[in-house]
C-alpha cells in the first residue's frame, strides 16, 4: 500500500521512519506500507515547484499524500490532488483557506484564527500586555496569523503598529521605527525563525524590555534559540503544536527515537508528519486502500469514531477536531520548554 510525502526534505526521513515502525508491526493487512517522495530538482519558482511536485506524486498513484511543507505550497498543490481524488493531509499549514481548498484537502492542525486566539490570550492574560506591535511576513501564513491575533486581542490591548515585511526588508530599520515613540509591551511575530531572531537581538541591542511572542512558523530547532541569542531567555515565547521537551511518555519516546535514528533533535513538524502517516496507516488497516473509503475514515475521526491518539495528542477533523493542540513555549538555554514548566 502506497502513500506519498511532500514535506520539507528533512521531514521526509520521519515519514520513512513512521512507515518502518508500521511495517515492523506487520504492515497493513500483511502488506508493507510504502512511502514515495518526489525527485523534482529544485530549479523553479517556489509555487511552480510545488505544482510540479504534486503532479509527479499523483502520477505515482498513492492513496494519499502528506504535505506540502506549509500553507502556500499546500494551497498551490491542492487543486491537483482534488482533481485526482487523492487525499491531501496537510501536516503544518494553518491558513483558513485550506478548509476551502477542496474536499480532498484536510489540514491536521488548527487554523490561524485558532492559533491567533491562543497567542492573543497569552499576550493579554499571561504577559498582561497593554500595547502590542505585530510584525507579519507578506504571505498567506503571516497575513492570516496577523488577522487572527488582531481579531482576538480585544479592547484592552492596543495594537500600536502593524508592520509588514518581506524577504529583502531591513528589519533593523523597521524595528527602530516601531520603538521610536516608545517600546510596546509585546511584539508579536507572524513570521519565520530568521526574522524573529533578528527582532529579539535588536531589542537586546537597544536595551528595551519588550517581549516577543512568535507563531509556529518561527519554531525551528535549534535555530530559533541559538539565533535569538542569550538575551532570548525570559523574553522570547513561541506557539507551537508540539515540543520535544513535552513531559508525556509518547513525546519523550518519539524525541528519543528521532535523536537515535536521525541524529538530530525532533521538531513539531517531525511529530506532525509522523502522526499524519499514523493516521493514514490506521485508515488503510481499517478500510483498505480505496481512496474514498480512506478519506471518509479520516473524516470520521472525532465524529463517529474516536480521535486518533498520536504523538501530538488526539487528532480529529472538522467538528470532531476537539481542543486545539497548541502549547506556548519559552526559551531555556538552547532549547524550548513549555512556558509553564519550572526550571
Image (cartoon, rainbow, N blue to C red):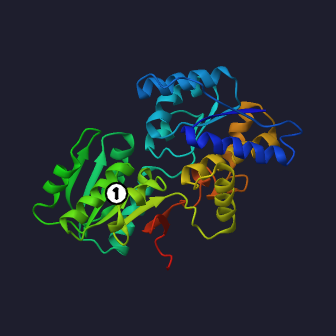
Instruction: Identify whether 10 is placed above or below 340.
Output: above
Image quadrant for the N terminus?
top right
Depth check: give the residue in front, 9 or 122.
9
Identified at 83% across, 40% down, the residue is 28
- Tell whether 193 sits left or right of 242: left
Query: Can you see residue 340?
Result: yes
Task: Pinpoint residue 257: horizontal percent, then vertical percent.
Answer: 69, 56
Q: Residue furthest bottom?
A: 342
To which quarter of the image does residue 292 belong? Answer: top right
Instruction: Identify whether 67 is placed above or below 200.
Output: above
Instruction: Identify whether 126 is placed above or below 273.
Output: below
Q: How many marks?
A: 1
Secondary element under disc 1, as helix, strand or loop, is helix
Q: Residue furthest left?
A: 181
Depth check: give the residue in front, 31 or 159.
31
- Tell whether 204 sits left or right of 75: left
Depth check: give the residue in front, 24 or 295.
24
- The residue beneath circle 1 is 149
Task: Pinpoint residue 135: horizontal percent, then vertical percent.
Answer: 27, 52
Task: Pinpoint residue 325: horizontal percent, then vertical percent.
Answer: 55, 60
Q: Residues within 10 Å of mark 1 (few under 14, many from 20)?
A: many
Identified at 53% across, 30% down, the residue is 78
Query: Can you see residue 132?
Result: no
Task: Pinpoint residue 224: horizontal percent, then vertical percent.
Answer: 42, 56
- Tell whether 253 sits left or right of 95: right
Identified at 72% across, 52% down, the residue is 304
Depth check: give the residue in front, 276 or 87.
276
Amino acid at each position: 500500500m502506497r502513500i506519498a510525502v511532500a514535506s520539507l526534505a528533512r521531514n521526509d526521513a520521519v515519514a520513512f521512519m513512521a512507515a518502518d515502525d508500521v511495517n515492523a508491526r506487520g504492515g497493513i493487512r500483511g502488506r508493507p506500507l510504502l512511502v514515495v517522495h518526489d525527485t523534482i530538482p529544485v530549479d523553479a519558482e517556489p509555487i511552480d515547484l510545488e505544482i510540479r511536485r504534486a503532479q509527479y506524486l499523483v502520477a505515482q498513484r498513492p492513496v494519499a499524500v502528506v504535505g506540502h511543507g506549509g500553507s502556500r505550497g499546500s494551497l498551490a498543490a491542492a487543486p491537483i490532488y482534488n482533481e485526482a481524488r487523492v487525499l491531501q493531509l496537510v501536516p503544518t499549514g494553518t491558513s483558513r483557506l485550506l478548509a476551502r481548498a477542496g474536499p480532498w484537502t484536510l489540514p491536521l492542525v488548527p487554523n490561524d484564527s485558532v492559533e491567533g486566539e491562543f497567542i492573543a490570550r497569552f499576550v493579554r492574560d499571561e504577559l498582561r500586555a497593554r500595547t502590542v506591535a505585530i510584525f507579519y511576513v507578506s504571505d498567506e501564513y503571516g497575513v492570516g496569523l496577523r488577522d487572527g491575533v488582531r481579531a482576538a486581542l480585544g479592547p484592552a490591548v492596543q495594537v500600536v503598529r502593524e508592520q509588514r515585511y518581506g524577504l529583502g526588508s531591513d528589519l533593523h530599520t523597521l524595528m527602530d521605527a516601531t520603538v521610536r515613540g516608545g517600546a510596546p509591551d509585546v511584539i508579536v511575530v507572524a513570521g519565520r525563525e530568521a526574522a524573529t531572531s533578528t527582532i529579539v537581538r535588536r531589542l537586546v541591542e537597544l536595551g528595551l524590555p519588550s517581549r516577543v511572542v512568535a507563531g509556529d512558523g518561527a519554531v525551528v530547532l535549534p535555530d530559533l534559540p541559538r539565533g535569538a541569542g542569550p538575551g532570548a531567555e525570559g523574553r522570547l515565547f513561541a506557539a507551537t503544536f508540539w515540543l520535544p521537551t513535552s513531559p508525556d511518555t509518547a513525546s519523550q519516546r518519539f524525541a528519543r527515537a528521532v535523536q537515535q535514528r536521525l541524529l538530530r533533535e525532533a521538531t513539531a513538524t517531525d511529530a506532525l508528519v509522523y502522526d499524519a502517516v499514523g493516521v493514514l496507516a490506521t485508515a488503510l488497516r481499517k478500510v483498505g486502500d480505496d481512496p474514498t473509503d480512506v478519506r471518509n475514515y479520516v473524516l470520521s475521526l472525532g465524529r463517529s469514531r474516536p480521535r486518533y491518539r498520536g504523538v501530538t495528542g488526539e487528532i480529529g477533523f472538522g467538528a470532531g477536531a476537539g481542543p486545539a493542540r497548541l502549547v506556548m513555549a519559552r526559551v531555556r538555554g538552547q532549547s524550548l520548554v513549555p512556558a509553564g514548566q519550572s526550571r
